[in-house]
Amino acid sequence: MSTVEVPVPTLPFGKRFTRWFARNTIRIYAVVGFTYLFIPVLYTFAFSFNDSAKSNLTWVGFTFKNWQNPCGAPEVCNALGNSIRIGLIATTVATILGTMIAFALGRHRFRGRSATNTLIFLPMATPEVVLGASLLAMFLNFGINPGFWPTVIAHIMFCISFVVVTVKARIASLDPRLEQAAMDLYANERETFRRITLPLVAPGIAGAALLAFSLSFDDFIITNFNSGTINTFPKFVYVSAGRGIPAQANVVGSSMFFLALFIVLTGELIGRKKRKR
Amino acid sequence: MAFLQAAARRANSFTGKRSRLPYLLLMPGMAFLSIFFILPILNLAATSTQSPAASGEVGSYVQTFKFSNYANAFLESREQFARSFIYATLATLLALAISYPLAYAIAFKSGRWKNLLVVLVVAPFFTSFLLRTIAWKQILGENGPVVGPLRALHIIGQQTTLTASAFAVVTGMTYNFLPFMTLPLYASLDRIDPRTLEAAGDLYANGFTTFRKVTFPLSLPGVVAGTLLTFIPAAGDYVNAAILGNPSTKMVGNVIDSRFFRIVDYPTAAALSFMLMAAILILITVYIRRSGTEELI
């Protein structure tokens, strides 16, 4: 079979351009949108190579020295270490507690369900400044000084709801027939959970943990209320903003960006491979 | 949020027996939230009606059920209150206007790049939001690459600055909360079956009508979730106002922060926090009722 040649009238450039533009407006818009999202990230990355002495406000010259010595500026690594420690503990606890709640909500009907849902939603509907201030006020009332553990507790508190929501969504998207099939094949409830349900929910739990860690790591407002003299990375950035942030902070920020991107993309690739098999 | 509940209910119908297990699963987490979320909020309510102790010691207060704290706190900082809600509304609307086409493009026009683009929406999150906000301050600042050309082209006056202004605060908030808007929008747009849009076309709806009568109504849960997730943190935010603003752009968050730390006036800070929380909860309830997506929570 031969294709019929349709004579394509050549339009003048102006018209062709308008037509192309009309067809691709939404794509062009998306490119502009992403550029907007990434301008400050690129700026932060670029200025991590700035050969600046103290404040990193103007471009001086290109150097690798900040990347070779990220702990060069005082306090950067101490604050970073605290942030990572707080983030890891808070993520672990919040992920365990939140996943348990998510299973209760997603897999069981019980009295008090809607009250539980409300209690999960409320922390997300409360502004951070209120969460931070109320916790600090309580700690002070009970004579507990703000510091490392109060900060960890605060972080667990605001991360739980996000874990519940993420894991619950994953549980809800599972095909119940998979579990029914396992039961039909004489797996008991425990075995079904361990070998079918948990592996299927695992990506959701991993995603929730990543979300919890990034929320905790990046939190400033609640941390500022409850951390006392303990320094965290966001706190360090905020405090040093006045007199100029050292370029090492940009190194840390950019590294976190690439690390997170790497983790997410690896997870995506593994998921894709599994789906193919 | 829980718009997947219906599906969950269907899913658990076969394990729907009542047992102690759900309570055992709930217990630790709920106990934690009760002690470290509910209790502090109740404590905050109690603190909000206290008065300074007779000893006159800084930071020590006694309970006197002084409800006038609320009136005083509101009168003192009603400007900042109003500003918080105006800025948050503006930032939410701007974020919606920017995010909707973005989410639409990812959901319908990105083909096999979809997952990657979703990751890219969240990716800026991982560079500390403070670093990004400060980056904006420097980009828009006096030594940045934006102000000079705009002045040379007489788009802005020679004395006008872009930073330290209400404009900078609102755009800063818009930027910072953009992913919170884009993700729920994308999630609800992505669920739309493209065939419904084709059906609209078959029924002689043009592009705009299809959008107005089919796409937009179907994406409404995402619009509601996105606007809430943007508005709530924006209304309580004080970091953008502190970094990108000037003294006349202070928001209620700034007042609570300074009452707590600089003035050590806990009752006023507590009263303000409580009013902010109440105002937001009332707004959310009305908004969800009016938008008819109650199953969201």
Image (cartoon, coloured by chain):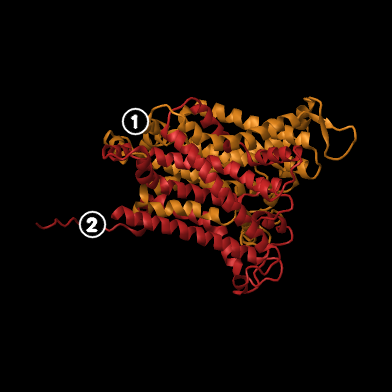
> What amino acid is at disc 2?
Val
Q: Residue at x 55, y 37 (%)?
A: B28
Q: Are marks 2 and 1 in contact (CB under 8 Å)?
A: no
Q: Is residue A236 left or right of residue A93?
A: right
Q: Up-down: is B250 above or below B71? A: below
Q: Report in which chain the residue with disc 1 lies.
A: B
Quote the CA–CA distance across marks 2 and 1. 61 Å
Question: Which subunit holds the residue at mark 2?
Answer: A
Letter of the chain in red: A
x and y percentages locating residue B8 in the rendered image:
39, 33
Q: Position of residue B49 (x, y in %)?
A: 77, 28
Residue A17 image offset from top left, x and y in percent: 37, 56
Of all chains in the rendering, the one displayed in orange is B
Q: Which residue is mark 1?
A: B14
Q: Secondary structure at mark 2?
A: loop
Q: Which mark is residue A8?
A: 2
A273 lies left or right of A71: left
Above or below B22: residue A60: below
Horizontal and vertical percent for residue B128? 59, 55
Q: Residue B73: which quarter of the image? A: top right
Answer with left or right where residue B20 lies relative to residue B198.
right
Quadrant of residue B207 within the rendered picture: top left
Res. B222 visible in picture: no
Indicate the secondary structure of the residue bearing disc 1. Answer: helix
Q: Nearer the viewer, residue A195 or B84?
A: A195
